[in-house]
Amino acid sequence: MGEFFSIIVSLVGIAFGILQIILFFKIWGMCNNVAEMKDRLVRAYPTEEEKKSIALYGKLHTPNTELKEENVVSSEDFKVGDGVIYEPMNRRMIIKTIDGNGLLRCVSYQPNGKEEYEGAYKPEQVKKL
């Protein structure tokens, strides 16, 4: 009887240990997701200091990030009617007009077909679909 009891306790202990390892990796994965969500929120709702940085550099620049020369995007790369996406908010839009300053004025369409103004974006802020 004692040997049977020890086998049962050993099996339960092994199962518990395996479940603890699985739980550890699940929590680790959730931490990565939270970091990604925080990064998206910071890009979507910048503070006043970050807004100044975006105005100066055309993108969010913090002391932790390096300024890299990237492919420079200009309004000539876009034309009226192109589909674009604003990644921080995952907004899919269509370019309605391009103003004299090179800002892309974008709209989206609701399911009922009504046009909704989304805003004016610098060419660096959006990507072509």
Image (spheres, helix red, strand yellow):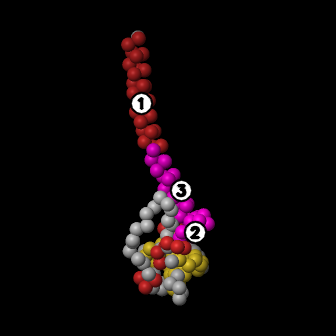
Tag 3: residue type?
Answer: Lys
Residue 113 shows up from this direction = no
Nearest the viewer among 42 and 17 is 42
Kindly indicate the quadrant of the structure image that contains residue 128. bottom left
* Circles 2 and 3: CB atoms closer than 8 Å: no
Q: Which mark is residue 51?
A: 2
Q: Main secondary structure of the magenta part?
A: helix
Residue denoted by label 3: 38
Tag 1: residue type?
Answer: Gly
Look at discs 3 and 1 and give the one toward the viewer: 3
Residue denoted by label 1: 17
Residue 52 belongs to magenta span: yes
Marks 1 and 2, the one that precedes in the sequence: 1
Q: Quadrant of the C terminus?
A: bottom left
Look at discs 2 and 3 and give the one toward the viewer: 2
Residue at the limit of the structure toward the right, as seen here:
48
C-alpha gap between disc 1 and disc 2: 48 Å
In this picture, which residue range is highlighted in magenta? 28-54
